[in-house]
Image (cartoon, coloured by chain):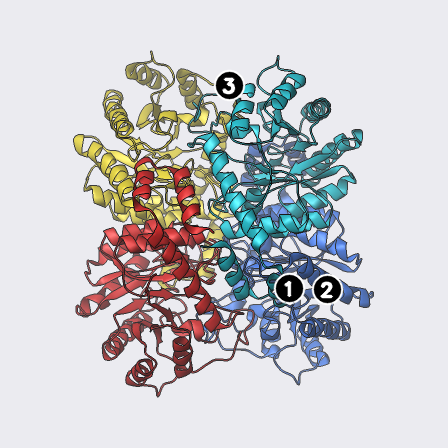
Chain colours: A red, B blue, C cyan, D yellow
Amino acid sequence: MTDRKYTAGMWVFGQIIDRYATDGYNEPPSTLDIIRQAADAGLVGMDLNYPWPEPDLSPEDVSAALTASGMSAVCITPVIYGRHFRSGSFSNADAQIRRAAADLADESVDVAKRMGAKYVKFWPGQDGYDYPFQVDYATLRRHGVGGLGAVCDNHPDMQFAVEYKLKEPRNRLLWSTAAATLVAIDETGCDNLGVVLDFGHSLFAKENPAEALSLLHSHGRLVDIELDDNYREWDDDLTAGSLHLVETLEFLHGVRQIGWTDEIKLDLFPYREDKGEAVRQSIKTLQRLEDAAERLDLEQLGRIHANHDAMGAQELVRETLLR
Amino acid sequence: MTDRKYTAGMWVFGQIIDRYATDGYNEPPSTLDIIRQAADAGLVGMDLNYPWPEPDLSPEDVSAALTASGMSAVCITPVIYGRHFRSGSFSNADAQIRRAAADLADESVDVAKRMGAKYVKFWPGQDGYDYPFQVDYATLRRHGVGGLGAVCDNHPDMQFAVEYKLKEPRNRLLWSTAAATLVAIDETGCDNLGVVLDFGHSLFAKENPAEALSLLHSHGRLVDIELDDNYREWDDDLTAGSLHLVETLEFLHGVRQIGWTDEIKLDLFPYREDKGEAVRQSIKTLQRLEDAAERLDLEQLGRIHANHDAMGAQELVRETLLR
Amino acid sequence: MTDRKYTAGMWVFGQIIDRYATDGYNEPPSTLDIIRQAADAGLVGMDLNYPWPEPDLSPEDVSAALTASGMSAVCITPVIYGRHFRSGSFSNADAQIRRAAADLADESVDVAKRMGAKYVKFWPGQDGYDYPFQVDYATLRRHGVGGLGAVCDNHPDMQFAVEYKLKEPRNRLLWSTAAATLVAIDETGCDNLGVVLDFGHSLFAKENPAEALSLLHSHGRLVDIELDDNYREWDDDLTAGSLHLVETLEFLHGVRQIGWTDEIKLDLFPYREDKGEAVRQSIKTLQRLEDAAERLDLEQLGRIHANHDAMGAQELVRETLLR
Amino acid sequence: MTDRKYTAGMWVFGQIIDRYATDGYNEPPSTLDIIRQAADAGLVGMDLNYPWPEPDLSPEDVSAALTASGMSAVCITPVIYGRHFRSGSFSNADAQIRRAAADLADESVDVAKRMGAKYVKFWPGQDGYDYPFQVDYATLRRHGVGGLGAVCDNHPDMQFAVEYKLKEPRNRLLWSTAAATLVAIDETGCDNLGVVLDFGHSLFAKENPAEALSLLHSHGRLVDIELDDNYREWDDDLTAGSLHLVETLEFLHGVRQIGWTDEIKLDLFPYREDKGEAVRQSIKTLQRLEDAAERLDLEQLGRIHANHDAMGAQELVRETLLR
């Protein structure tokens, strides 16, 4: 049986709010509450949005709370998608806001170091555009890719990663797909910039997550993995394995094949569910799928692959996975 | 030239917030500020979410403010999609919450009467489900359709309307498409229940809005019309006519054909734009398109329709619409 | 263990061709070859496209071949989507072609009676339109719905059914979703007209198939069920249960709940696979899922439904379905 | 007014067939008939699928016919997507078929040289997979990208291009998006391999075509441009400018900005329309849009771009484009 450990984003336990339930789906918990709840749910690490709401809470305070709960910081994710950055961070039309994004990134590197986080994660959800003719694409790209690359250049001893997404909140995002992100990373020339592959973002970008995993790994750019589920048309952030059992199994098989023994991160938005329960159900389903991945007859799979044998694949999946 | 009047939802001028920019895209204005801004943008009526934020503001106060600005109340839209109703209103699993939805609807009828609004609008955005096996569909339907119908039955002198939408915030909504809404309305047996057709919701539900308009009109269930635009995959609520010029023109032609001389309502979420400007640009584009609809050679269109002549249609649109 | 019987469309074993591989994915078999192959794959009935390619083959000949193979005719499906009907059958702009559609339907009724088929199936895949302004929607509807209803009226002793689909080959189809089909059937006023629910068409139409099943059953219009799978964006006609295990399980649970003990039909297009193997793998997976549906703890499911308990649903599915 | 010249694919005038209308939407014309019809429609060049149906027709015969009609060969497109290659060409599981793909490509290079075509185009529409676990992604990629690259390496004096597409006929294609194609081309290390950007494929791949154009141009990989239209969910190959007027205008503005004075190719499938008329309507609409692109106030557009001014963009488009 798998001894995989799991981590999650802070947001899983935070207050969820959207454009309709503007009073929020739940009360806002404190950062320390979130840490306690995450530990209770069995997690060992957190993706931390920075700055967190409490200005008096130092990185050392948060580290201490994590340690006390048996957890650690996975990464620092600068909040480059709040009101100040609503029209873009590194790609903003306003040079001052581009500068503010770089400053917040620099600060996040400092926080990551003080907390021993593995990497700084960029999620440029406001970097893009909404309407035709709104931007000059070459300029947007120069600012958005170049500015982010400059931060990576300035901190050669820190690992960075971009979590790509097709859209939301912006209608069109610059870092949209696995391949688009590889092209952009290549443009930066940075060795310390990689990719966080979110299973749900990949489904939603019309990719097959297992294929995206293979691509990113073969280019040496895979930094972290996030699991969740959706209906392939939006980033629904449903519990892992709730819908796409076969695709999640194939993804976890890929994770084994590339020798990924690190934690797997959960990226959930349990709008109406108990957050701890959403994490626990996700982990239970993932463990069951990892066990199935371990049981897969690799010789048989090799024969299937040698012949692109779709029907053999269906039989293997059924007999391995289902009661 | 068209003398069409335009109305809008209160939310167009309100604070927009989403799950990422939880500090909001702008400061929250007061209800009276919203009314002033709407009037300044040239609107003549408002779709009012009830209750509004200010508990001390009476329906008569809001009516007075509307009148002072040369506007009137289009409809009252009970907020059956906030935190209390996050897992459903009329279709909630909890009978007390279903009761609360009915109570708020009753109250909205009272407010609508006091304000002289034309109808009470239901937007059941939390009524549905997110996961397989989560609900029993027949029960969900019985509560969700039956409960809403009971409100209509209780107020035979008030007009009601449902604004359907495929999803969001719930992953699956009960009132999802024009046809699904007709079927459900028929199940209620209510004569005073109709449909608000939102152009963007129709695009997003994989309908052709002009065809949906024809269907709803032919069944005598069309209560109001909302305009906006999107990329066909989500309810982006972009400015009207910003993307789908041809489809919007066809829709406005349909609006003329059915003899709709009432106002047209705007349903926009100008996250990053000046709200007044978003309204003004929408109106200018719609006026231009209505002028084109007026210029359409109906004899030629008749010949096109008689032959399902797609190429003739493209020529007619191009020559009528483009410089 | 389930003793479900399975049927399939003739096309599953026929020559598959598309707009790129215009030389076909395989050689064209004869109708009698198709029947033998279908029987070999374990099927007990066939959905028969009429006319079949061989003009000399009488309905009695085909019946005899079916009987000799231990099979029977499920339904007759008039080919109202070939070249002659490429711009529509009942809704065609040309009255002569509308008449030809009605004539072929009449002939299909006769064939169905001679073969003891349960129903005549309409699949109006060319009835709709492709471009804005191409058709007048009310007229299209009058012809397309009215003409089909007239056939049903003329044969009160025959059962008819429409298989709805969102699009393909036409970009927009008149009989597009379960609800749209219910509305149209209601317009015809025919008691002998119902619906064939294709799981894949339902996924692709942005419905949840289990919910569509419940809706059609509650309106008394469910005539037959087809199984297959796809990526939710197109009618891929992949083998049943190859992708959507949870949704297929929920659908089969629904099938049990409504007391459907008839056969289930397979609608596959095995472009590159051995056709018999595609049928066998589909059946094996469906049997496994039907067994799981039988094992579902209905008391636990009742509690889940009573609370709209999504996390309980995930647990129940996992523990019932997965090894 | 623009003096743009237009070309098209041979298939626009060929017999169209699909999986339902297997008797074809029209009679199959000869290659020489196609050339005459194309010239009559005002085209100056053809994308030629090779081999064409007539085995006795030499490249010189076709060249002579083109010249006689005032046209020339744009590119040779080897038919690596017919029955023999139904399970893949360069990425096929069978080494003999991979070899056959390379042989046909070599032959196409020879034909291209004999006909003076500008490039050899690969459209690897069968290279990919359909089901989870069917292929090993690294191997598929090694064969599919490597094999195609080897052909380019073997013919350093010939220009090659890949036309990417998200799917169809295969459910998942290897050369899926602009960025995925750039990554793969980079893997080949070939200087003589570029991209054909099809507007419709780009829409359908959830890209913005104008942004894809900018990306491919900035990487020096743009070889040709194809125009058409669709509903963003499938490669409908509707007439150019029939739906997405604003996006097509923005694309044509981009075409001007990068200094593209070459022809633009049409990629249409006029299933039910007169083929010549489909070409003529496409050209008329594109000319109108190119004229509008020429009229765009570039200073105003510069100010819009400097501020990411969406509302200014809508105003500029409206005032430039609409009557």
| Residues tagged 1 and 3 counted as in contact (Cβ below 8 A) | no
Asked if the residue at tag 2 contacts the one at tag 1, i.e. Cβ–Cβ closer than 8 Å, the answer is yes
Left or right of A184: which side holds C2? right
Q: Please, which chain is the residue tagged with disc 1 on?
A: B
Image coordinates of residue C19 in percent, x first then y, are: 46, 29
**Res C301 → quadrant:** bottom right
Indicate the amino acid at tag 2.
Leu
To which chain does the residue with label 2 belong?
Answer: B
- Say what amino acid the circle numbered 1 marks: Pro
Q: Is residue C65 left or right of residue A85?
A: right
Residue D2 in the image: state x and y as whole percent.
Answer: 39, 37
Task: Specify few, some or many for label 1: CA neighbours under 10 Å numbering under 14, 14-19, or 20 or more.
Answer: many
Q: Is residue A200 above or below residue A21?
A: above
**Sequence-first tag of 1 and 2:** 1
The numbered disc on residue B148 is: 2
**Which residue is labeled 3 in the image?**
D27
- In the picture, measured across the screen, residue C63 lies left or right of residue A109, that is right
Mark 3: few, some, or many residues within 10 Å (few <14, many ≥20)?
A: few
- Which residue corresponds to mark 1? B124
**Are tags 1 and 2 found on a single chain?**
yes
Query: Of tags 1 and 3, which is closer to the observer?
Result: 1
Using the rendered image of the protein, determine whether residue D295 is visible from the camera's viewpoint.
no
Q: Nearer the viewer, residue B171 or B165?
A: B171
Count of marks placed on residues? 3
- Tell me the element at label 3: loop
Considering only vertical position in the picture, is B159 above or below A210?
below
Element type at mark 1: loop
Q: Residue furthest bottom?
A: A56
